[in-house]
Image (cartoon, helix red, strand yellow):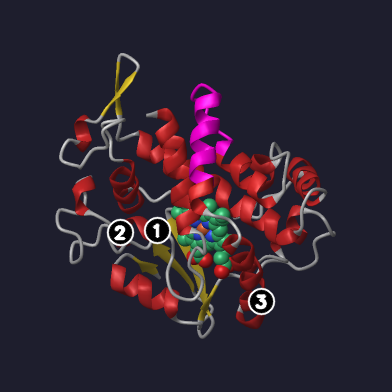
Amino acid sequence: MHVTRLAEARTVLTDTRYVPAPVPQDGREGTLAWLRGQVSRFSTGDTHARRRRAVVERLAAIDPAGLRSAARAMTVERGGTWRGVPAQVLGAALGVKDTTAVPAAASGYLTGEAGPEADAAVAALLDQADLPAVTLLLQAHAATEGLIENALTHVTWDSGRPSAQRLSAAPRSARTGIDVEALLHETLRHDPPLKATRRLDTRTGDEVTIDLVAANRDPDVFPDPDRFDPTRGPAPHVTFGHGVRPCPAPGHALALAAGVLEGLL
Ligand code: HEM
């Protein structure tokens, strides 16, 4: 089943009879396969609830405003080389000093495609932090960088200076000329970094694909859905999931992305 309408997407994501496909539980301790067997993202029921509580608790101790200013400062300090900034800033908040292993560990996190490099990267992170902290870093990495990358496609650069032509209708901040919040909110709806999420129907065994791009452009909910319009304001999109297991960190994700964009723009 392929879900493309917003209401149906929300219904499936709220119904506990739809679960993430189980992942192998026999990975050697400390490898990526093992880690996938330990995290909330791929678990269900009470196990999911318990593991989710652990990451939510860890997130509660991190102030999004602090992430934003640290991401802005680091982006400026690096002269605009922003890749790796979200992971490094979040890592610092979680007590992980060296986040260079994050991209390699994160690359197979969702797909399960692991190799010696990913396993070594997971080991390097587990040497520095416990499982909830490593989970947060791996969940955050690709989605947050994807959001920044997608937002930047809506900014045009005029002789090295950012220009907000396509955001002309949006309220602007005096300093940058671009309203970073408006840019991010509409980017989340229009270009979600995670295009789809999948569930297994426990009654039939069928796979269900929730098409987040299509649901976010449901013509019954969003007028002129394909148009990128930062004046819409926060929209009821499903980019951060919904229901039983939505992303627990939308505020942290937005803060990291906003900080990087402020540093760039
Ligand atoms: C723009 C950036 C982000 C997007 C679009 C995003 C999106 C999502 C989505 C859609 C899910 C649910 C997946 C499902 O259907 O099961 C999810 C789960 C999760 N996200 Fe995010 N995320 C982002 C950034 C972050 C960040 C920065 C963190 C951590 C600081 C984070 C931590 C998590 C965790 C721990 C889960 C698993 C929750 C659970 O198992 O109950 N995410 N995210």
Q: Position of residue 226 (x, y in %)?
A: 21, 49
Q: How many marks?
A: 3
Q: In this rendered view, identify the residue nearer to me: 221 or 135.
A: 135
Q: Quadrant of the N terminus?
A: bottom left
Name which residue lies at 50% across and 83% down: 17
Ligand 1 neighbours mark 1 (CB distance < 8 Å): yes
- The residue singled out by tag 1 in the image is 239
Q: Nearer the viewer, mark 2 or mark 3?
A: 3
- The residue singled out by tag 3 in the image is 50
Name which residue lies at 46% across and 48% down: 255
Q: In this rendered view, identify the residue nearer to me: 17 or 208.
A: 17
Residue farthest bottom in this picture:
203
Badge 1 or badge 3: first in the primary sequence:
3
- The residue singled out by tag 2 in the image is 216
Name which residue lies at 66% across and 76% down: 50
Query: For the residue labelled by badge 2, is the local secondary structure a helix, a strand or a loop?
Result: loop
